[in-house]
Image (tube, rainbow, N blue to C red):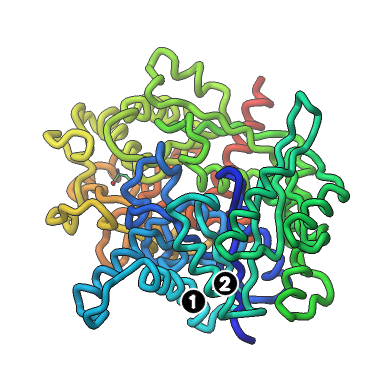
Amino acid sequence: METKYIFVTGGVVSSLGKGIISSSLARLLLSRGYRVTIQKFDPYINIDPGTLNPYEHGECYVTVDGHEADLDLGHYERFTNTPTTRANNVTTGRIYQSVIDKERHGDYLGKTVQIIPHITDEIKRNVKMLGNTGNFDFVITEIGGTVGDIESTPYLEAVRQLRWELGKDALCIHLTYVPYLRAAKELKTKPTQHSVKMLQQVGIQPDVLVLRTEKDVPAQMRRKIGQFCNVAPEAVIQSIDVNTIYRVPLKMHEQHLDEIVLEKMGLAAEGEPDLRAWNHFLEKIESATESVKIGLVGKYVELQDAYKSINESLFQAATYCDRKLDLRYIHSEKLTDENVAEHLGDLDGVIIAPGFGQRGTEGKFVALKWCRENDVPTFGICLGMQCMVIEFARNVLGLKDANSTELDPQTPANVIDLMEEQKSISNMGGTMRLGAYDCVLREGSKVAEAYGTTEISERHRHRFEFNEEYRGRFEEAGMMCVGENPKTHLVEVVEIPEKRWYIGTQYHPEYQSTVLHPNPLFIDFLKAAVAYGKEKASAE
Ligand code: GLN
């Protein structure tokens, strides 16, 4: 079949959850046996979000092929269980860079290079790139930003042209907000009408409207919206707040979003999507009564999105362990030897977060020392693993000034050091060790048991690494290097086998944890936390 293109735009306000709607629709189409991918266009000038700090843009997600991407790609993967690549996230910066490179190369043959047609053509080429692989029946394209933004204009023009060119093979879903005014006790449809008008002005007629709302939008109001906006009443769908984002596919299916899309695109919408495994997960969410208390020690704890993939991986793993996740954010800058027991004493497991730079690391060492000495299940990820190594060097190996050269370039005991290949790099963008690499796990280690295999592949994002020169001393003292890259022998996993669960990974297992395939290491960590919680309870 010809590849079908679905465009998802947003209006009224940002943060309406276009990513979740795109992911939910993808889930439904996948569950009907179609091959689906989702891509996102971000209308900013950065080439990728790799150089943006979490205050600007939340977590930076990493694809298998080593692209630093928008965190929505994490949702795409968690919902669809399909890996994304560089082609799934394109920014205005990338579009312009490519056009300017072509101009310098002489590809435009003396023509004036303009937003229309050159930038819009480049956008269209990127939209079709995934479809042209022949790997997908549907390409869902999420347009970042809000209709009316100056930055989005070329994207909307590209969408307009593509819809015209592709006819029935293209469709536009517009997501808007229906606010509830408490004082007037009323839902308001005017912002939606305005937002659709704005789309119509640039020549796009939405086929489906999804109304984000906190309160039920009555059928009659939806009909009215449809009438004002030239949208069939059944294609005006509401997306009401739910207790978990993973319920949204069902909410969309209840309102026939998948059938509407298929019919509009000339495909038979027969039968039902196979959502058995998905529903099994949702049932587990609902049936869990006891909780597991996990502490996340990091410096961006006030930001909801900074550790998105870790949160979701923990939630998935807790759900599969039949527990509600009671996640507590612990600000690493506030931890001291005096207050650490108060902050961590009640927890069943502790995660030491990834990150960059010195700020907050001393608190991570405090947490790690306490967790190690009190034998609490502890999971260090990337910088968290590096901190595990440093704390062990300081307090067990007696290397008082041990550090990473990232945090103290003058350290006399550089147990974590800049990778050799990084030493000649001066550009910051896209130059870390990124993406999936193979890792061989030591037979009989906890981590190998957790994965049920000794050969794995996980994604990375770092410049610094465990310093090979110290390996012997760590192993003699009980911290084992149980995972390494088969080619370069870089240390990827450390663990203290005599502890309940004390494991650090240089890689980010959270980038490969989906609803249908939760990451085995998160599952194992949660199992250990649940067991530890039970042990504590029975000792009381
Ligand atoms: N800052 C560390 C490094 O570059 C860790 C990075 C991370 O936690 N993602 O190696």
- The residue drawn where x is 65% and y is 54% is 196
Residue 385, given in percent of the width and then of the height, sits at: 36, 42
Mark 1: amino acid: Lys
Q: Are marks 2 and 1 in contact (CB under 8 Å)?
A: yes
Asked if residue 335 is positioned above or below residue 130 in the image, the reply reads above
Quadrant in which ligand 1 is drawn: top left
Residue 458 figure quarter:
bottom left
Question: Which class describes the residues within 10 Å of circle 2: few (<14), some (14-19), or many (20+)?
Answer: many
Query: Which residue matches tag 2?
Result: 139
Q: In the rendered image, is residue 446 in sight? A: no
Q: Secondary structure at mark 1?
A: helix
Query: Which residue matches tag 1?
Result: 128
Q: In the rendered image, is residue 54 in sight? A: yes
- The residue drawn where x is 83% and y is 47% is 221
Residue at the right extreme, as displayed: 220
Question: Which class describes the residues within 10 Å of circle 1: few (<14), some (14-19), or many (20+)?
Answer: some
- The residue drawn where x is 75% and y is 57% is 252
Residue 352, given in percent of the width and then of the height, sits at: 43, 36
Q: Is residue 72 left or right of residue 36?
A: left
Q: Nearer the viewer, residue 311 or 257?
A: 257
Asked if residue 486 is positioned above or below residue 448 in the image, the reply reads below
